[in-house]
């Protein structure tokens, strides 16, 4: 059976709860105070089967003091029943509730003229005209208007038929999306423990699922699921469900939080959105403090308009739309595409509504042309269809992510793309040149090009400043070009530059050649020959340079070059010519041939054999150990 969630809307005492009770047999007013005062204060719930349709009713309070409770229940509905009492017609809360439903873009609905038994035909016709005037040009413009009497039962069958017809036009919610259930009630049941209820807006909830309570990231396990009071193995999107949770106490959860799949919802205090101010509202000033309602949450925040000051404004005029950045005073759980309502801070009246474009925007200035251009790319109204809207928004998020990149997982949590559609959207982003994939991160192709150019420029400058250098150390190059970016991105850029850049530990342009000046060439020859002649008893490098009449600065550059070229090898604090060390290894190995297995060499024997002092003997013996020519055993070395 198809399931739909139906919300009531309308002025106080216009018969919303009575209508729900007449249709379902259940009184949605559950609180003792509600029954004593005869008004709905908090959300009420009931359900009924109408033909092959399962209807879950969310009955909301009509009193202006409880609109925030109304908003906690209206966000997850599939269609609305706008209730207007025939003996009072359209009243202030009728208008506010209707505005809320329109701003939230509730997809369908119908109108109930309640208390029809209390008026004559002429009055009923007049009320019908007033209601048509109210809903003209809206999603309810052509909705059926059904006179009913909850007291006598008149018109209830016609209303059920109209309700079934309206429900047939409602598209089902996606069960393929991540689990997301905004919590509207929390209570404890004896023998069960903590129970939360809400309308499952996407995904499904199964017994034994491990989910999180957000904001807060409290991990919980599903012990049981009830849909319309009946235990089920799972609840799917579009159903109201009661979920029994393990791992959390009642006082650790509250209305406004959500039950969700881990890692699929953005916890944020900053969100970019498009906003529509009601025609009857006062101008909305830049930085105004407002009440932000989304799902079942109410959070205080402020509104900033987007665009350069010369083209922007300091107040949004009634009936106008604008791109805005919302700065919230505590965390909300949002995804792209979420609808929301704004109410004035004081008095608390509904003034605007809109849609989230980016729940975790980059922390950049919004009073710029670049920011305005980015918002236009995020706006789904500017795209030809849903596919193009999702691809365009994801591309804008990739561009704004900079060197950190956009995690592929954020295509679900931030861009609001359903998990089964991530792969094709990802393919489209890459194939169209809108994103480059680096592991599990997406970066802008233009960024890759800029980094490539920056590395080439850096190496060119390095070669110009240090012509004797064989290249810039790899890690130094990464720190200077991409200090705060993922190492994988640096490696990807280097891969793209293969053939242009060479080297592993040191990076150099392939075209680079070590070029020595005549003076440096003479210095290189003199220093190398001095170390070659010194054999195993080299002088201090400064003394070698002085003896060869090489200026200190030139000597320093040449010595570093000879070490990089492995002509000179550093052993402890001493420099030896490579050939001298190779000859040493050969001579020591030859001792084994003459002395046989178990040939040993101690410090004294080494000094005598090679004519060196202890200053050279100890570092050279340790060098032979490292080279696996010898192995120290006690005070002697065994020749391997």
Image (cartoon, rainbow, N blue to C red):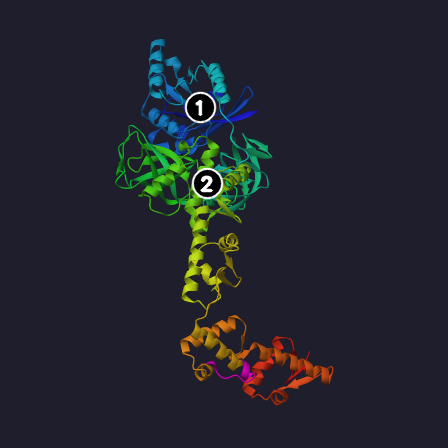
Q: Is residue 536 magenta?
A: yes
Q: Are marks 1 and 2 in contact (CB under 8 Å)?
A: no
The image quadrant where one finds the C terminus is: bottom right
Q: Which residues are drawn in magenta?
A: 532-541
Which of the 4 image quadrants contains residue 338?
A: top left
Q: Which residue is mark 1?
A: 108
Q: Nearer the viewer, residue 291 or 491?
A: 491
Q: Nearer the viewer, residue 409 or 618?
A: 618
| Main SS of residues in magenta | loop
**How many numbered marks, from 0 up?**
2
**In this rendering, is residue 201 above or below 635?**
above
Per the image, label 1 sits on a secondary structure element best described as: strand
> Which of pointers 1 and 2 indicates the residue nearer the eye?
2
Q: Residue 504's x, y, as percent?
A: 53, 62
Q: Which residue is mark 2?
A: 394
**In this rendering, is residue 535 above or below 388?**
below
Q: CA distance from mark 1 to mark 2?
A: 29 Å
**In this rendering, is residue 600 above or below 157?**
below
Q: Residues within 10 Å of mark 1 (few under 14, many from 20)?
A: many
Q: Is residue 75 visible?
A: yes
Marked residue nearer the N-terminal end (1 or 2): 1
Q: Is residue 444 visible?
A: no
The image quadrant where one finds the N terminus is: top right
Question: Residue at 48% of width from left, 67% of height from top?
Answer: 514
Q: Residue furthest right?
A: 596
Per the image, label 2 sits on a secondary structure element best described as: helix
Q: Residue 622's x, y, as percent?
A: 59, 79
Question: Residue at 43% of width from left, 63% of height from top?
Answer: 462
Q: Residue 185's x, y, as percent?
A: 46, 36
Q: Residue 396's x, y, as percent?
A: 42, 41
Q: Is residue 405 magenta?
A: no
Q: Nearer the viewer, residue 14 or 222?
A: 222
């Amino acid at each position: 059976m198809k399931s739909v969630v139906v919300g009531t809307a309308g002025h106080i005492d216009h018969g919303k709860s009575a209508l729900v009770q007449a249709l379902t047999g259940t009184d949605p007013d559950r609180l003792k105070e509600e029954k004593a005062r005869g008004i709905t204060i908090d959300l009420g719930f009931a359900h009924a089967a109408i033909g092959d349709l399962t209807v879950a009713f969310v009955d909301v309070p009509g009193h202006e003091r409880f609109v925030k409770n109304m908003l906690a229940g209206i966000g997850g509905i599939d269609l609305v029943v706008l209730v207007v009492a025939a003996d009072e017609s359209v009243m202030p809360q009728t208008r506010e509730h209707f505005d809320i439903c329109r701003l939230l873009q509730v997809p369908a609905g119908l109108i109930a003229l309640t208390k029809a038994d209390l008026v004559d035909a002429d009055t009923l016709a007049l009320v019908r005209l007033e209601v048509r005037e109210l809903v003209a040009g809206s999603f309810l413009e052509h909705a059926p208007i059904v006179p009913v009497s909850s007291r006598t039962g008149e018109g209830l069958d016609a209303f059920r038929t109209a309700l079934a017809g309206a429900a047939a036009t409602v598209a089902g919610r996606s069960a393929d999306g991540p689990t997301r259930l905004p919590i509207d009630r929390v209570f404890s049941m004896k023998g069960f423990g903590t129970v939360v209820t809400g309308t499952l807006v996407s995904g499904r909830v199964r017994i034994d699922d491990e989910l999180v309570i957000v904001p807060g990231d409290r991990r919980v396990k599903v012990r049981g699921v009830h849909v319309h009071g009946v235990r089920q193995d799972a609840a799917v999107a579009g159903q109201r469900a009661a979920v029994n949770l393990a791992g959390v106490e009642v006082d650790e959860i509250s209305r406004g939080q959500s039950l969700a799949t881990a890692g699929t919802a953005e916890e944020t205090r900053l969100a970019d959105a498009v906003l529509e101010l009601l025609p009857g509202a006062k101008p909305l000033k830049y930085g105004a403090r407002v009440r932000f309602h989304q799902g079942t949450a109410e959070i205080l925040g402020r509104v900033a308009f987007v665009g350069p000051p010369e083209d922007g404004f300091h107040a949004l005029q009634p009936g106008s739309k604008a791109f805005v950045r919302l700065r919230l005073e505590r965390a909300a759980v949002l995804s792209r595409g979420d609808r929301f309502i704004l109410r004035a801070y004081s008095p608390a009246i509904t003034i605007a509504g809109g849609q989230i474009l980016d729940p975790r925007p980059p922390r950049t200035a919004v009073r710029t042309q670049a920011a305005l251009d980015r918002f236009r790319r995020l706006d789904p109204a500017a795209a030809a269809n849903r596919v193009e809207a999702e691809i365009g928004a994801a591309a804008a998020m990739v561009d704004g992510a900079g060197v950190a990149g956009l995690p592929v997982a954020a295509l679900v949590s931030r861009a609001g793309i359903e998990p089964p559609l991530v792969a094709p959207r990802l393919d489209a982003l890459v194939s169209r040149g809108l994103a480059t994939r680096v592991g599990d991160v997406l970066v802008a192709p233009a960024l890759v090009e800029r980094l490539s150019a920056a590395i080439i420029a850096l190496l060119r400058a390095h070669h110009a400043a240090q012509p004797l250098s064989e290249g810039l150390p790899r890690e130094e190059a990464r720190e200077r070009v991409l200090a705060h970016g993922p190492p994988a991105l640096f490696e990807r850029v280097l891969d793209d530059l293969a053939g242009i850049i060479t080297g592993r530990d040191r990076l150099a342009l392939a075209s680079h050649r070590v070029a020595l000046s005549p003076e440096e060439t003479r210095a290189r020859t003199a220093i190398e020959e001095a170390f070659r002649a010194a054999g195993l008893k080299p002088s201090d490098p400064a003394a070698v340079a002085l003896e060869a009449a090489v200026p200190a600065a030139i000597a320093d550059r040449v010595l570093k070059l000879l070490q990089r070229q492995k002509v000179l090898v550093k052993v402890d604090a001493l420099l030896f010519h490579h050939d001298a060390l190779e000859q040493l290894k050969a001579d020591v190995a030859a001792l084994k041939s003459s002395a046989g297995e178990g040939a040993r060499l101690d410090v004294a024997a080494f000094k005598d054999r090679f004519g060196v002092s202890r200053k050279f003997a100890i570092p050279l013996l340790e060098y032979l150990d490292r080279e696996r020519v010898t192995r120290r055993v006690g005070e002697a070395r065994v020749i391997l």
